[in-house]
Amino acid sequence: MISRSSFFKLIKEDVRQRLWTIVLAAIVFILPVPIYIAMEISGSRGFGTGLIDNFARNLAEPMARNSVWLVLVTIVGALICAVSGFGYLFSKKKVDFFHSLPVKRETLFAVRYINGVLIYLVPYLAMVLVSVLIIAFTGNMRAVVFSIVLKGLAVHLLGYLAIYTTCILCVVFVGNIVVFFAVSGWVFGITPITLLVFNWFEETFFNTYSYLGDSFNEWLYSLRFLFPGYFYIYSVDASGLAVSTVSLLLQELAFVVVLTVITLLVYRARPSDGAGKAIAFAVLKPVIRVSVELLAGALMGMMFYSMADRSTGVPGWMMFGVILGVVLSHMLIQSIFHFDIRKCFAGKWSMGVCAVVAVLFVLVMRYDTFGYDKYLPKEKKIESVAVEVTGLDRYRNNFTYTGSSIIWTEELEEMELTNVPAVYPYLESLVSDNEAYWDLRENGRTSDFTRVNVAYRLENGKTVYREYRANGLREDLFAPIFESMEYKEAHYSDIYTIPDSFVTSITAVHAMNELQMNLSAAEGAEFMATLRRELSAQTLKEKIETLPVAVLNMKVVERTPRYDSDGMPVDHIYDYSTELPVYPSFTETLRFMKERGFAATGEYEWTGKEMMRLELPEIAIKEPELYTGEVYTKDASVELTEYVKVGIGEQFGDVKIAYPEDWDYGYNTIPVEPEDYERLYALCTWEELYYYGRPGFERYENYRVCLDVPRDGYNIYETYCFIVPRDADLSFLFE
Amino acid sequence: MIKAENVIKRFDGISAVDRVSVEIKEGVVFGMVGTNGAGKSTLLRMIAGVLKADEGTITVDGEPVFENPVAKKEVFYISDDAYYLNNGTPVDMADYYGAVYEKFNRKRYLELLSQLGLPLSRKISTFSKGMKKQVSILLGVCAGTKYLLCDETFDGLDPVMRQAVKSIFAKEITERGLTPVLASHNLRELEDICDHVGLLHKGGVLLSRDLEEMRTGIHKIQCVFADEEQEARVLMGLEVVNKEQRGRLKTLTVRGTRDEIANRVAAAEPVFFEMLPLTLEEIFISETEVAGYDFKKLIL
């Protein structure tokens, strides 16, 4: 064993050999931040004392965990230190020199590894020290500065160790600097790129793929230990993660420890004659080659699929892309492995096998061989389900009070329907409806189908997301779900979770009729309790067969103090707005509102200053040549938009449809004569009422009436819109 | 003693060293000769612990050498293309080696540098090829190891410097039993310095002999015989390894002691007779031809 003094002598000698990296690190670390801080301080004289907390925070920002500059320095520094420390492995004469010394490989590794860490850490600490001293001596020191600096140090140091150790592993794998960069790209990129490509296949070829599932991030998290940059990226910005930064850093620490041990073992096992070769370990070659060839094949296949004309030749071009990807990547890799372009076709049989496997993979995905779209877990394996019928109470905001703060939530994340036998028939219908939808999609009518998102929470802890097309609402099967409290508490999570004391005002609205109810705390609590009780008792039948009679707008202010990631209280008022439709069956709620003077009707007193217009969902003209745009027959307009198909041709006869050049899928407006206002208004229902309980409802399929009402006697108008069913008789407008 | 037993080393399926067994005793200057690609460097790198043998064992004083600092402390390896620290001076090199070789004799190193006229604080990268080799040899000599492995180290040294190095070796051998192992493809470079020579060819050892033993055991004579009967009488009692004839002058390479051969030939009273010195090359030619190889194809 080498003595301790010899070990430190080696450290010292290694430092002398890597002097340039130390100078570089010192310049990059010690100069910019203190200078920046000094400049900020010199330019900020005269600030009020109230701003000092924020100012101190700003001063510490360049040392924070999300400092882009530090991230850049960390990544580049890790790369440079790994190569400067272990790049000797690329040179035969250096390997002969160092490996002939009476020093164990472990010692050589430790000397170089530790120096690589010190080259980063010492200037970093010096930067922190100088910066903190400047902040302190200028009277700007606050506790938050220490918090920011220490968190930044933990995140960046661990990130550095993870990337640095991975880069060393890559150096040990190869025998040439150019190949090092290629293999580093492979090590860092193979996992996320493979997942991205797989995700692309899913999105493209699986009809029930759900974006809510976010499978890419989920998989990436599952495979985080195969993606060395994961922990660093997500600890720099952990906002999108379910796990805490501390948990992430602890995992990263474990990752670094394990990776360092693996790197040391690989370093010990590395044959000295690996210097100058492309790859020092022959066993790695097929692993790299096959993975890259398969990935390149799949990627090129998708690129050609995207570029090809969908009506002709898509499968052919896709297969061409797959094979081209495999062959090109094979040629490139073999040329690199052999340092000889003439060897680009070495291992032809292996390339052929890769091409076949890549083609099979693409075909399997393209034709959903394993039944992704028909996936339905066995009833016994489902722990709970979440169902989100889009269009049901559309435009409602979905907030949840967690006990400490109000957060925006996804309905699927909140809902846990545990009575699986009651839900299962509905799920089965979704699978079969979805199949029918996609069969019909080419030629049949599909506008009645509703999008339904489902989250299956399985016994094994996994959550699987799917997006289905249901044929209508499937009232008989969906009713038991809708009427369960588990569904309602998640669907109306704001109503059920936000404390009454947070509700600062409640306004009842029906078109032009609006009343802000002034309620005491006790009245407010009573009102909310009544509302919840009647909401809980509401049946699906009532919800879809009757329209609401009013909408309640509720203003909410979060009263729980919040703290930022540094533990400092947040000086900000979080306020929210949420609304809920009130149905005729909410008798107690309506009585409460009526007692305070609110009439849940559209009654309106005309002033004679109003303006009304009728918007048609479809242009029906008798003289299409007046428009400069293309003219479509009704039959040929299928591709344009679904609403064209189901338009109101019946009302105006089977006419040609034309779209002016500047047509933007908006409405085509007909001014209504004042004498027709009241008659037309009598047919109107306030548009917003349709937005609740009407999945599949499209206003573009109906007439829409907009009424401009003068406000407060000024020449300012507010617009209220209404829906008139498309089967209404509007012939009086044209008489 | 360095001992290699049935050592095999392959690179990408090609055997660089194939079942080599060789012993290098302490206190001798061991010459390792062979053509380019014969496996000399590979064998030296294995002895130095740089490479691990695929099969077989290599021990230094009974200790396996690979990844064994105890054994490696007794071995100093000078590569054919030696590495010097970036921007390193001879003193920097001494500092580095001093950190890993406990017995590194810095004082003697500085003395020798001075004696050879090598600048102490100039970057080695600015040195000539020969100067670099001198630095390497001095570092190796002063490292205090028992074994000094030199791969083609004498290439590029001028005759004066070769003599200087020889005398340094001689002193080290005498004073502390240094065992230099010198690998070269040039037999003439080793002739005047080695005690023992091993010949490597195609990854294997063709022969390994003591040079003095070879020199005393084989001789070249030139003679002219009166007639064929006389010639037959003389040759019958000699172990003739090689025989050439130019006119009536016959040149014979004969195995045996000098006195024995001289007495036997002189007793027959030939017309002309003289004994000539054999060069190392000639000895090898004879020995390898005996072994069935055409030496001229092995060593140029």
Image: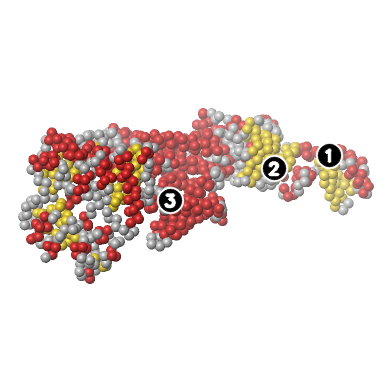
Q: Residue under label 3, please give it.
A: A369
Front one among A658 and A26: A658
Which amino acid is tagged 1? Gly
Q: Kindly report which numbered mark, 2 or 3, lies closer to the viewer in this rendering.
A: 3
| Image spot of residue A236 (x, y percent) | 35, 40
Q: Disc 3 is attached to a residue of which chain?
A: A
A715 to A78, vertically: above or below: below
**Which labelled disc corresponds to residue B204?**
2
Query: Which image quadrant is residue A160 in?
Result: top left
Q: Residue under label 1, please give it.
A: B256
Residue A385 can be seen in this image: yes
Residues behind callouts 3 and 1 on a single chain? no
Front one among A219 and A2: A219
Residue A199 can be seen in this image: no
Taking the spot 43% from the left edge, 39% from the top edge, the residue there is A225
Taking the spot 36% from the left edge, 43% from the top edge, the residue there is A464
Residues behind callouts 2 and 3 on a single chain? no
Q: Earlier in the sequence, mark 1 or mark 2?
A: 2
